[in-house]
């Protein structure tokens, strides 16, 4: 049974958010995130948290937030929308280990772990080569200690942090990840490089609150980005944000806030583009095989085949 976590955000105090950016900025970020709706919520539905990050971490966070141990981790069938809803013919067991078919001369077995914070259920992923233990973290949510614990437990060597985009809920824990993993590269599309390299905001709607870090490198559309023994193909999928990217490795797509299970990302911000969002999804993502597994910035896993057939924003009218 795949284990998932869904915690009560209403029971969580602002104190757990403040440290993410440090000092006065942390306090402002806490207020911003507390009182505004999620900056990257899927359209037309609530976010559902991803699989829990191990029993010890989940239990500690649950006790701290007033959630009982019994409710801290929920099985897939207890959630309103989960991987259990995906046809077994489309979705394989999670986490799934399989060799990369495009490099038979140097087989890589991919292992994926996902954590989700309780403020916005923003997913953060650990992608690891099981043989070399080289790993990358994809996005940094508001509870970075969870992914740090997962990496430590698995003995993974995190060699880079990859960002699907730079909304606050996806970069809030960058400093904590840097403290844990050292000055590893932070890879982002050039259209949003300024957010993390210069500390400038992505959204004018949310004011001048951002996270500034060094050793920022570029993710280029159509190119491969190598993290140790792992190779990610970069697909530029803008629309939710100018520099949104999808990261493809083996049979997996990390779509950020472009594509969700049963939905697509918001495109009502000043620098969003609805046409670009839908065009990118259709041309770059729906062109992938049906059994390609989709890991989104929020909510459960899905497959390209399922979204092509059932996503109300993508199904062509008959």
Image (tube, rainbow, N blue to C red):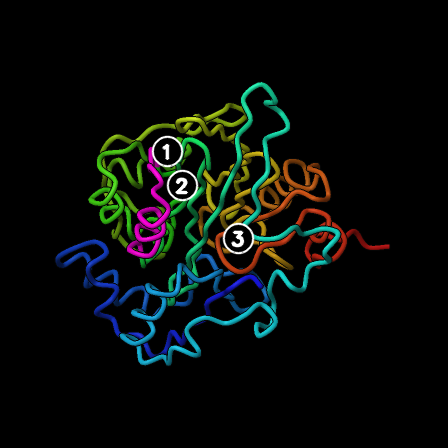
Determine which of the numbered discs, if any, sits on residue 163 in the image. 2
Instruction: Give the mark, 2 or 3, whose residue is nearer the N terminus.
Output: 2
- Main SS of the magenta part reads helix
Residue reaching furthest right? 318
Instruction: Give the mark, 2 or 1, whose residue is nearer the N terminus.
Output: 2
Instruction: Give the mark, 3 or 1, whose residue is nearer the N terminus.
Output: 1
Q: Position of residue 136 (x, y in %)?
A: 39, 38
Disc 1, SS = strand
Residue where numbered disc 1 is placed: 187
Q: Nearer the viewer, mark 3 or mark 1?
A: 1
- Image quadrant in which you'd find residue 199: top left
Gap between marks 2 and 3 measured at Cα: 19 Å
Q: Position of residue 139 (x, y in %)?
A: 39, 46
Badge 1 crowding class, 10 Å Cα cut-off, few under 14, some 14 to 19, many 20 or more, is many
Residue drawn at (42%, 33%), measured in percent from left and top?
A: 189
Which contiguous range is marked in magenta?
Answer: 144-160
Q: Is residue 158 above or below residue 77?
A: above
Q: Which quadrant would the N terminus be assigned to in this image?
A: bottom right
Residue where numbered disc 3 is placed: 267
């Amino acid at each position: 049974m795949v284990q998932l976590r869904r915690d009560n955000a209403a029971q969580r105090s602002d104190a757990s958010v403040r440290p993410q950016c440090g000092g006065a900025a942390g306090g402002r970020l806490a207020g911003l995130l507390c009182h505004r709706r999620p900056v990257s919520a899927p359209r037309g539905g609530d976010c559902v948290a991803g699989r829990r990050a191990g029993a010890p971490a989940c239990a500690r966070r649950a006790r701290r937030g007033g959630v009982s141990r019994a409710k801290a981790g929920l099985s897939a069938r207890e959630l309103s929308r989960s991987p259990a809803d995906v046809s077994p013919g489309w979705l394989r067991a999670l986490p799934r280990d399989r060799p990369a078919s495009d490099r038979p001369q140097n087989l890589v077995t991919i292992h994926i772990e996902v954590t989700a914070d309780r403020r916005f259920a923003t997913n953060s992923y650990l992608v690891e080569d099981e043989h070399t233990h080289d790993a990358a973290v994809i996005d940094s949510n508001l509870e970075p200690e969870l992914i740090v614990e997962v990496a430590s437990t698995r003995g993974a060597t995190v060699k880079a942090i990859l960002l699907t985009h730079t909304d606050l809920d996806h970069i809030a824990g960058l400093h904590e990840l840097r403290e844990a993993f050292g000055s590893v590269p932070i890879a982002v599309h050039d259209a949003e490089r300024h957010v993390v390299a210069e500390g400038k905001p992505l959204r004018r709607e949310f004011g001048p609150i951002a996270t500034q870090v060094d050793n920022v490198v570029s993710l280029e559309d159509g190119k491969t980005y190598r993290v140790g023994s792992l190779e990610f193909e970069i697909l530029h999928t803008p629309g939710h944000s100018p520099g949104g990217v999808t990261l493809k490795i083996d049979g997996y797509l990390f779509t950020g806030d472009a594509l969700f299970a049963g939905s697509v990302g918001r495109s009502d911000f000043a620098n969003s583009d609805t046409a670009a969002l839908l065009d990118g999804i259709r041309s770059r993502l729906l062109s992938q095989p049906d059994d390609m597994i989709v890991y989104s910035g929020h909510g459960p896993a899905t497959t390209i085949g399922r979204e092509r057939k059932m996503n109300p924003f993508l199904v062509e009218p008959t």
